Amino acid sequence: MSVLSLGQRASNADGSQTVDPHTALPPPSDEALVQDTVRLVYRQTGAGLMGHFLGMVVCTSVYWHSAPSPVLWGWTIAFAILWTARFVGLLSYDRAVLQGRAMHEVWLRRWNIGALIGSGLWSMAAMLFYDYGGGFERTVLMLTIYSFAIGAVPYMASQTRLFIACMGLYFIPMIVRSALHGAPGDLQLAGVWCLMCVCTLALGRAFHNVFGEMVSLRVHTQDLAQRLRGEMAAAEAAQRQAELANRAKTQFFAAASHDLRQPLHAMGLFAEALRQRSKDTEVAHLVNSINSSVDALEGLFSELLDITKIDTGGVDIQPEHFSIGELFNRIRLTFEPNAFEKGLMLSFRGEQHHVYADPLVVERILRNLVSNAIRYTEDGGVLISCRKRGDKLCLQVWDTGIGIAQKEQGRIFEEFYQTQSSRPLEPHHRKGLGLGLAIVKRLADLMEAPLTLRSRVGHGTVFTLTLPLGRAPRLQPISAPSKSSLGVTLDRRHIVVVEDEAAVMEGLEVLLKGWGATVSAFDTVEAVRAWASQTDAKPDLLIVDYRLPEQQTGIDAIKVMRARFGADLPAIMVTGSTMTGHEEDARQHNFHLLIKPVVPTKLRAMISFKLSLR
């Protein structure tokens, strides 16, 4: 028996089906209707069988003394057989569902046959028992049959033909028997039965439409859920591809940066060695140009790698309490040579404060701001200060440079944006990609630290980073008094170099010997281990690369040398690798880190600083 949804579909003369234009949802398929109908009727069968059993007991009891025994017993036995068969069918259906072999159309047909026979038995009861007994017995019989008719509406209304047939079996015998009984008021009672029949059919139609809409909604919801799962799977696949692409991009930039930094670093070393050997002013000018270009390229590599790491989520914020004084010392070590070369005063104020933030991220922000301040300042100086404001600390970078126009201050943190000046910029002002302040802004946002800017053209600029107030650690490191980074002689200083790149090792050796040092150069950890085991002369400094042959690193070389000559042996790691974790390694193993290419003045400042610690 097919199941159709009234109000959802209409049949044309040629048998085709059209969708009711007043419905918002597409009509459900016959298969979906059958599946939902089977679940609905068998879910109600248990309660229905219990009701029919009680109705049979009530009618049998009421007509026990008034109806002929053969008729009553025959009807009761037939009802019991049908009831047992339907109960066994319910158990068989539940078992089939558990085993996953329920054929919906077959089970629906079986249920419909049982329901139709059951309605026929109640129709026979009306025909057989109506004339027996008195008003009480007829009232009980009518109420029983009508209750089953009303109770069948919710789970029979979804099947139009079955519903009409069963309602006919329930109501027509009662209407006929009431009209032909001949007692006073029986015709009026037959009219009441007709009215109840019409109301029940109308109620069934309403349930029929509601059921069709419910099935349509369920099917539509399942379809949407399936489409959503498909779209989510596609989105997850796209996200994985994007993550792989970002990871590949980061790896490419890191590898390309490492490979390109090596020759640039060697170029800078050879250029400085050439300057020392030649007193020609034109050669000195060329060397300065080479060093400036190398420094600019190093800045471009760093900016590209930083913005890539931030975009790919490679920066994790790990706040801790640390000293501003220690941070200022590292900044002074890096930028003092640059400020000295330009004749600028580099000053620090507020070293006694402590801050709670990520020290590596704060240092990266401060390095970018100080680098910009020195680059765009020709006269005066740069002040890095830290002062308390309420429960916050204001970390500020002041300069007396060219300043930033008011109209450009809103765009200064955009990527690849560079300021436009009313006067021509110097060549060193124009170098860079315009990513430095964009990186600063993104890092500040990652820490949720407000970053503000105040500037006047021709007077200077101040950047303010607001950070949470920190507390002093329990054990404060004892800092050695700072000494001048420049002018320290390397005479009678023995420096060990471990570098696998031949050009870089040769450039370092030439440059260090030009500064008066004695140099022992090796290209592997095993080579420096063999040398250390055969000498008692303790070197003054160790300069190593990070990536070394045979899957070893500069850290291995540092461990070998300190195991032989003591843990106080100073060490510098000069590497083109920009992978994260170097800073933590530097803290753990007590060495300083320089990223290739290193301008010779920076290298000499670092060497002077390390030697002054001994």
Image (cartoon, rainbow, N blue to C red):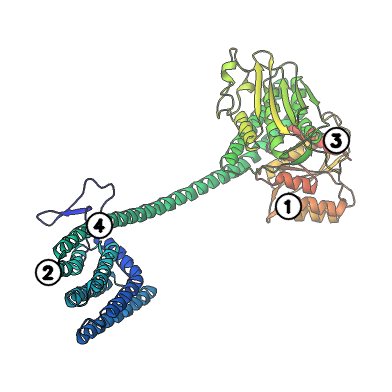
Q: Which residue is mark 3?
A: 490
Residue 557 vs 186, above or below: the answer is: above
Q: Secondary structure at mark 3?
A: loop
Q: Residues within 10 Å of mark 2 (few under 14, many from 20)?
A: few
Nearest the viewer among 111 and 441 is: 111
The amino acid on which the numbered mark 3 sits, given as a three-letter code, is Leu
Whichever of callouts 2 and 3 sits on the residue coming sooner in the sequence is: 2
**Residue type, mark 4 in image:** Leu
* Label whose residue precedes the other's in the sequence (2 or 4): 2
Residue sticking out furthest to the front: 184
Residue 48 relative to residue 499: left or right: left
Residue 203 numbered tag: 4
Give amino acid for label 1: Thr
Label for residue 524?
1
Please report whichever mark, 4 or 1, sits nearer to the chain's N-terminal start: 4
Quadrant (top left, top right, bottom left, bottom right) of the C terminus: top right
Measure how far apart labels 2 and 4 are at the Cα level: 31 Å
Question: Where residue 440 appears, x then y in whole percent?
Answer: 64, 32
Q: Residues within 10 Å of mark 3 (few under 14, many from 20)?
A: many
Q: Quadrant of the N terminus?
A: bottom left
Comparing 446 with 539, the one in front is: 446
The image quarter in which residue 82 lies: bottom left
Which residue lies under the disc numbered 2? 182
Question: Is residue 430 visible from the viewing direction of this image?
Answer: yes
**Separation (CA) of disc 4 from disc 1:** 92 Å
Of the residues under marks 2 and 1, which one precedes in the sequence?
2
* Residue at (41% x, 54% y) in the render: 229
Q: Is residue 356 above or below residue 179?
A: above
Q: Secondary structure at mark 2?
A: loop
Which residue occupies the foreground of this view, 27 or 392? Answer: 27
